Image (cartoon, rainbow, N blue to C red):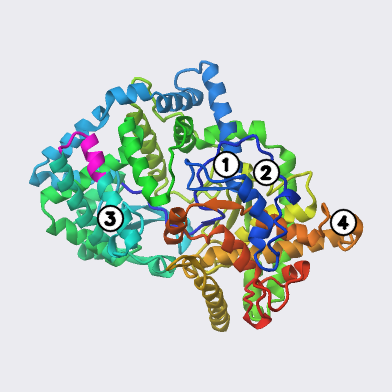
Amino acid sequence: MKILKVVLSAALLGSFSLTSNAAEHLKCVNKAYIDSAIPAAEDFYHHVNNGWMKAHPLTPEYARYGVFNILNDEAEKNVQDIVLNLGATNPEKGSNAYKIWTLYSQGMDSVRRNNEGAAPVLADLKKIEETQHEGMEDLLLWMHRNYGSPFFGAGPMEDMANSKEYAMYVSGAGLGLGDRDYYLLNDKENTRIREAYKKLIVKQMQNAGYSKKDANRIMKNVLKIETALADSTWTREESRNIPAMYNPRSIAQLKEMYPNINWDRYFVETMDIATPEQVIVTEINTVKQGDNLLSTLSDREIKDFYLWKYVAQAAPYLSDKFSDANFEFSKVKSGVQQQRPRWKRALGVPDGLMGEAIGKLYVEKYFPESSKQKMLELVGNLQVALGKHIINLPWMTDETKLKAIKKLNSFTVKIGYPDKWKDYSSMEIDPAASYYQNVHNAQMWHQKEVLSKWGKPVDKTEWGMTPQTVNAYYNPMANEIVFPAAILQNPFFDPEATDAENYGGIGVVIGHEMSHGFDDQGSQFDDEGNMVNWWAPEDAAKFKELTQGLVAQFDKVEILPGLMANGSYTLGENIGDQGGLRVSHTAFLDSQKKKGVDIESEEAMVDGFTPEQAFYMNYANIWATNMRDEEKRNLTIGDVHSLAENRVNVTLRNIAPFFKAFGVKPGDKLYLPEEERVIIW
């Protein structure tokens, strides 16, 4: 079944591939990377980063390679050392160390997996094939209970209207290609990726033992069903409309709306709970499409869809034939040319399934308590600065300002690691079982853990990321900002760096996440994390007007010939970037004033640059990235974050102190007249 998690919290990053240069130490502001041939006022991103980009060309295994990758790799290498050390201790059977080492070892054991081939999944594929018509309802429940969410999804999540309790959500089904456009648009690029997906399905079903004829039939039925589902799926822009996702329905209404699903059996047999009295339907028409398909498709078509869903979720943990087929598809979609080393792929499994057990060891070895205390100080300074910005907003009424300040002061701040760790003692990992079976057992453990929360109060001490994750996030339903330990590295954070560099790095990250509490989605939740309207009508109208101005700025950016940036889809992250820059700059200036530092003095210079120049340069520095065109297209379609270059150049065009720091004037490419600048927070 699908454990539903409506994507409300907005992380700083998308997912990044990992690198192999773990030994590289990143300076915050590095003069060696500055390209003086490119004026800062014309293209600040390349002015600061061109040297880095030339020194780090893309190699075959990467679709994109950036500063984040280096930090990710450093954290990953540390995790590898932890896991290898666990293996060297001959861990006790049943211990966390034993389970982590078993998962990693099985991921590395390609000989065993290649000998097993598709054997670990054949019994389940046979079960699907041999199901008779009268057993199709049972088969649907079995699939949802164990192997995915074909046709629709359901699961508990915090109630958006009462974040202290869980609600049961019913949602549309996920698409194999992720975005509806891949199925519905027939331009060259979408057609190219769709054809690669067809080849992937055929290849994987052949790897699972099907003839080419049968594999092609399965592929055609899968595309027929997923295209029908895509036709009812929200666009990327529609998916940002949070109130539209909140549609409470009684169980009687649910049964009337979607009569082809046995809802009583579904809740009792897939979740082991009594049928809830009320559910929240997130995408009414998408769920309806799934319900209609269940009643109109033949048994053969439905079983073919299940076969693919099953094989797709199992493929990463089977033989090299399966992983190689997945990689061939990735080459088309992202442009990557070489698969990541086996040890990295193997390490990701225990890191994902037992991340807090590894994270506990990670923070003990790599995260000094002094970093946490410094971060708390920085967060406090950023909160004060954002409060000043809110109070001085010319477009917001006093009544709404007070509510915004109340929300700001109610932020929960989580830094480094959770106060309590997950207990994995009941997770069953057995080296005698296949790799796939052990991974599946761990996944079912996580599903059971989520379902066990049903009927209980929401535990707001939980974390949505592990300490070893190089990222950060804001969760509107907990009104919390979270900064895992691993992001506290150069060039984000360095106890030895200047304040200018730290505020331009981690300070902007802090401000970014705070700003998510007041972006187009986060602003719809109050200080307790409940979806309520706390805005005066005139404030909401002005906010909408300002955000549309920011949308328009990004909509004008051409990513590739004929492919434009999507300002609506990336709006939340763009608000976060702009807010982070503005608020962190204020906090930096306040901190220097408090310390009695004259930032215009010779003594305050940072390697030949003024402190304010160093601030903006380090912001640009953290986004240094090389990227293939295929990946640019892939991210523009599927990622809520703007591409790195635009997070710098387009955002900075609205920042007046940046203009002053680098002498940007009318006629320069980055100059934007004051009346065209958008200032939200």
Q: Earlier in the sequence, mark 1 or mark 2?
A: 1
Residue where numbered disc 2 is placed: 489
Residue where numbered disc 3 is placed: 152
Residue where numbered disc 1 is placed: 72
Q: Can you give x and y, in whole percent of width and height, for residue 468 in the image?
A: 58, 39
Mark 2 vs 4: CB contact within 8 A: no
Q: Can you give x and y, in whole percent of width and height, for residue 116 in the image?
A: 28, 24
Residue 666, quarter of the rendered image: bottom right
| Label 3 Cα neighbours within 10 Å, binned few <14 / some 14-19 / many ≥20 | many
Q: Residue furthest front?
A: 37
Rounded to the nearest angstrom, the CA distance separating label 2 from label 4 is 23 Å
Instruction: Name the residue at 14% across, 39% down.
Output: 129
Q: Earlier in the sequence, mark 2 or mark 3?
A: 3
Q: Secondary structure at mark 3?
A: strand
Residue where numbered disc 4 is placed: 604
Q: Earlier in the sequence, mark 1 or mark 3?
A: 1
Q: Is residue 603 left or right of residue 350?
A: right
Q: Is residue 244 left or right of residue 412?
A: left
Q: Is residue 133 left or right of residue 412?
A: left
Rounded to the nearest angstrom, the CA distance separating label 4 from label 3 is 59 Å
Q: Secondary structure at mark 2?
A: loop
Q: Can you give x and y, in whole percent of width and height, for residue 681 in the image?
A: 65, 71
